[in-house]
Image (tube, rainbow, N blue to C red):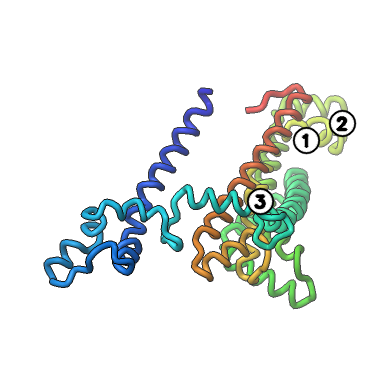
Amino acid sequence: MKSVLPILTIVAAIFLFWIVSVVPMNMHLTADQAQRDGLVVSPETPVERQAYSGIGLTLMNTGLIGRTYLLERPRLPSPHQVGFELWDTVFDKKITSRRSLVYHGWVTLSATLLGFAIGTTLGILLAVGIVYNKAMDMSVMPWAIASQTIPILALAPMIIVMLGAIGIQGLLPKAVISAYLSFFPVVVGMVKGLRSPDGMQLDLLRTYSASPAQGLWKLRLPASVPYLFASLKIGISASLVGAIVAELPTGARAGFGARMLVGDQYGQPMVTWAALFAAAITAAALVGLFSLIERWTLRRMGMQAA
């Protein structure tokens, strides 16, 4: 309970700030709509316009404050509007429907998992090479670090166009972008983990005339498991972000990124926010799943999860 209370406090503070921010963000739209509906009298003289403009109009007509939470196309949707949209698109729509977030979630998740598998495999192999090969340590590691300085929003269209030019479309380009974002945390974490055994342990292996392969399997890899899981939890989140970003410049018809584009293009903020929250929930679920696997694995190895 003590570990959950700080999280709940932060979440409550964020939601309170969100609820309070709805009024100033939507008050001008609410006032304009109320005037069109005849609920308030439109000020005519300069003095009346100054008294009734903006916040003054909203505060002097307290009934308008509640209407800021009910606009059909608000600048900032209220939490309950986003919640209703999430419920409608997750539970009330068939999963085969193009309006179902379950359908769009699977499209994004499939690219995420494929890219994560590619990035994790590449990251582990590069880490082993960096630890055991001085030339790779001096050459590959700096390039891996430098690669992360390139903005993914600039790189994603280039990758998609280049792969499309050679006939590769669909799932794989998105997976490549996901792999690009997910491999770096795995490389850094695994290099740190593979180098975590101290000198005494390494000297003991040399005393037993252990080969480098035996040292890798019997000492370095087991010691790197906690570092690996920490990297995997970061990598899976980055992979999901990569899949969503890859859907944005392509005009994708399915996926969380596609739903966000639809909401922005057609002035439907609830659609955008629902897709955003669905993506966040998906990322949290994936991280939680890896946390459970981490605890089970470390317990079987006689270790304790941090």
Mark sitting on residue 18: none
Is 280 or 213 nearer to us in this picture? 280
Count of number-bearing discs: 3
In 3D space, how far apart are the residues under numbered discs 1 and 2 (Cα atoms)?
A: 15 Å
Q: Residues within 10 Å of mark 3 (few under 14, many from 20)?
A: many
Residue 35 versus residue 294 in the image, above or below: below
Is residue 173 visible from the viewing direction of this image? Answer: yes
Residue positioned 69% across, 70% down in the render: 160
Residue 79 versus residue 197 in the image, above or below: below
Q: Amino acid at mark 1?
A: Leu
Residue positioned 70% across, 49% down in the render: 137
Residue positioned 62% across, 54% down in the render: 89
Q: Amino acid at mark 2?
A: Ala
Q: Quadrant of residue 57?
A: bottom left
Is 233 or 192 nearer to us in this picture? 233
Residue 164 rendering spot, x and y as whole percentages: 74, 74
In 3D space, how far apart are the residues under numbered discs 2 and 3 (Cα atoms)?
A: 30 Å
251 left or right of 51? right
Instruction: Check disc 1 and report the residue beneath it.
Output: 221
Instruction: Check disc 3 and report the residue beneath it.
Output: 184
Residue 162 rendering spot, x and y as whole percentages: 71, 74
Residue 212 rendering spot, x and y as whole percentages: 84, 37
* Quadrant of the rendering where the C terminus is positioned: top right
Instruction: Check disc 2 and report the residue beneath it.
Output: 210
Q: Residue furthest bottom?
A: 165
